[in-house]
Image (cartoon, helix red, strand yellow):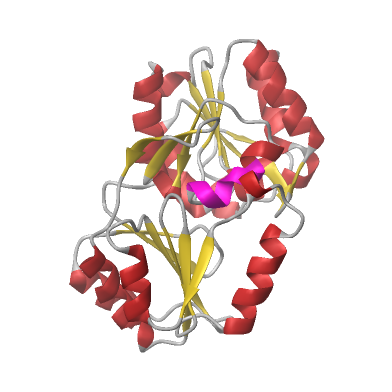
Amino acid sequence: MAKKIRMVATDLDGTFMDGFDSVHPDNIRALEACEAAGVPVCCITARAYHLAKRPLALGKFRGLCVTSNGSGIHDVQTGRARYQLTMPQQTLYDILKICRGENVHVGVTGAYYGVDCRELYDPEDIRIKNNYMNAQWPKEQQHDLRTVDTIEQLAQAMGDTTQSIWIQNKTPDELPGRLYRAIISTGEFLLTSSHPGGLDVLLPQAGKRNGLARLAEMMGVAPEEVMVCGDHFNDLGMMHWAGLSVAMGNADERVRAEADYVSRPNNQGGVADAIDRFVLHG
């Protein structure tokens, strides 16, 4: 069990947020009370920084956040990167060539922009997604998503700035094993999942656990003084690392089984329940 909690680290989607573009008011109330008590609440998300600006603003986060599944650390107020881990352009291109032969959607993100490719993502889906994501949002919270036609153009557009490659089967089936084997054969990667049926390809030094460890070191906080809240398999590493791990009630049963405490679901203020129990009134 943890010592006195000096930092709360929370996932965004499925955890702190109760929908794609909404945050449960109890979580905002608990975050503000936690910060007022001198305990920072930090976001640890699979989203790239440009994709996280909107929920960070909605949730009233301050200070530092870990982005792109541990590939970046950013100052929430200024957007300045405190840590960056990026792939070489050739590495990205090698993986895109593998995906070209599979029935998959692919998204590629760096810290400050992402690129969708019509060759690997249905053009109408791209249009709908981009229009929905930025509809009526303040400009400073909007995603920077660009679109190209071919994987060659995608690799050129990203250059050496890629932090995460997201791969999703176009059918309800799991991704085929041959795709995993082909990716692994091109180099050393961390393969994780932030979406059901999806695959995130990261450099081996990334991952939420490593990102949180770097952040905690920056802030002078020991692992046993950190409470982590999460809901999906890519949260397990940081849940095992922290002194106190909390799974949302909506989490997969295998994630709930690994947690020290199972809170309410994300749409019922599960993070607030954990903060109230272990930080404010612990």
**Which residues are the magenta region?**
49-55
The answer to whether one can see residue 218 in this image is: yes
Q: Above or below — where is 218 with respect to 74?
A: above
**In this view of the protein, which residue sits in the foreground, 149 or 51?**
149
Q: Is residue 145 left or right of residue 242?
A: right
Main secondary structure along the magenta-highlighted residues: helix
At 46% from the left edge and 25% from the top edge, which residue is drawn? 243
Instruction: Point out residue 171 in the picture as x, y percentages from the top left corner.
Output: 56, 84
Position of the C terminus by quadrant: top right
Q: Above or below — where is 93 with respect to 188?
A: below
Count the marks: how many? 0
**In this view of the protein, which residue sits in the foreground, 261 or 187?**
187
Instruction: Point out residue 178 in the picture as x, y percentages from the top left corner.
Output: 32, 82
The answer to whether one can see residue 282 in this image is: no
Magenta-colored stretch includes residue 6: no
Instruction: Point out residue 32 in the picture as x, y percentages from the top left corner.
Output: 70, 21
User: Residue furthest toward the front?
Assistant: 139
**In this view of the protein, which residue sits in the foreground, 240 or 137?**
137
Q: Is residue 276 left or right of residue 74?
A: right
Q: Is residue 202 left or right of residue 109?
A: left
At 19% from the left edge and 65% from the top edge, which residue is drawn? 187
At 43% from the left edge and 38% from the top edge, which residue is drawn? 238
At 80% from the left edge and 34% from the top edge, which residue is drawn? 25
Instruction: Point out residue 71 in the picture as x, y percentages from the top left corner.
Output: 36, 46
